[in-house]
């Protein structure tokens, strides 16, 4: 696996992975808009196996999306993408990473817990299916 920085030119590959990973996919156009936004930063597996997209604002960063192709999961790619995004955000001046994850998303919760994220807050019934959102965070430096 080889993870590299992502840019607007990766929008189609990222949208294809996103569509396979979430109930509501983001179009390539939506992905391009996100990648072109202020503070946007992303990483992608060179083999098209997954991506992570974040945003750095005022010394803090947020994970907007992280997804691995269903055929490529449980091989360490999610962990590698997360670590690469954290490093990129830290290099851009971020001291803290924040994200939200459904309380029902066992795979993502296990990945984030193993990477050192802790629960900062909970938003009741945040998602369309009624699940709570967990707000997780981690100090990057
Ligand atoms: C969450 C996701 C990105 C993980 O990607 P991945 O490449 O399979 O993750 P990794 O192989 O790097 O796993 C790293 C660790 O996370 C945990 N983990 C990952 N998937 C897991 C699962 N299905 N069940 C339990 N633990 C899991 C394990 O601790 C794992 O380490 P191990 O394999 O040594 O036990 C992937 O499942 C995915 O794309 N899910 C759909 C999209 C999504 O929910 N994104 C997150 C939104 S917040």
Image: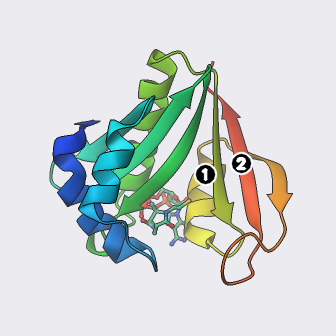
Question: Which residue position holds label 1?
Answer: 112
Q: Residue at x 36, y 39 (%)?
A: 42
Residue 86 vs residue 21: left or right? right
Q: Quadrant of residue 101?
A: bottom right
How far across and down, in percent of the image, does residue 123 sit?
82, 62
How far across and down, in percent of the image, does residue 91 sit?
45, 17
Q: Residue at x 39, y 72 (%)?
A: 21
Judged from this view, the residue extending furthest toward the bottom is 129
Whether disc 1's CB lies below 8 Å from ligand 1 is answered: yes
Label placed on residue 136 = 2
Residue 2 in view here: no
Closest to the camera, between mark 2 and mark 1, is: 2
> Mark 2: which secondary structure?
strand
> Mark 1: which secondary structure?
helix
Residue 9 vs residue 83: left or right? left
User: Is there a contact, CB below 8 Å, between mark 2 and mark 1?
Assistant: yes
How far across and down, in percent of the image, does residue 92 sit?
46, 18
Check the image and report above or below for 112 versus 15: above
Q: State how the image is colored.
A: rainbow
How far across and down, in percent of the image, does residue 47 sit?
15, 53
- Residues at marks 2 and 1, CA–CA distance in whole angstroms: 8 Å
Residue 90 in view here: yes
Q: Residue at x 24, y 67 (%)?
A: 16
Count residues near mark 1 (Cα–Cα under 10 Å), then give few for <14, some for 14-19, many for 20+: many
Residue 96 vs residue 93: left or right? right
Front-most of residues 114 and 39: 39
The disc, 2 or 1, on the residue closer to the chain's N-terminal end is 1
Q: Residue at x 74, y 69 (%)?
A: 126
Front-most of residues 111 and 58: 58
């Amino acid at each position: 696996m080889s993870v590299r920085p992502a840019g607007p030119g990766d929008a189609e590959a990222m949208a294809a992975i996103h569509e396979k990973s979430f109930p509501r996919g983001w179009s390539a156009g939506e992905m391009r808009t996100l990648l072109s936004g202020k503070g946007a930063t992303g990483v992608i597996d060179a083999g098209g196996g997954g991506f992570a997209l974040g945003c750095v604002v005022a010394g803090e960063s947020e994970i907007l999306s992280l997804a691995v192709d269903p055929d490529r999961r449980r091989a360490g790619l999610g962990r590698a993408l997360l670590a690469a995004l954290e490093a990129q955000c830290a290099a851009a001046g971020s001291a803290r990473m924040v994200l939200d994850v459904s309380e029902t998303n066992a795979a993502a919760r296990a990945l984030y817990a193993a990477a050192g994220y802790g629960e900062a807050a909970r938003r009741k019934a945040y998602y369309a299916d009624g699940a709570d959102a967990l707000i997780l965070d981690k100090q990057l430096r």
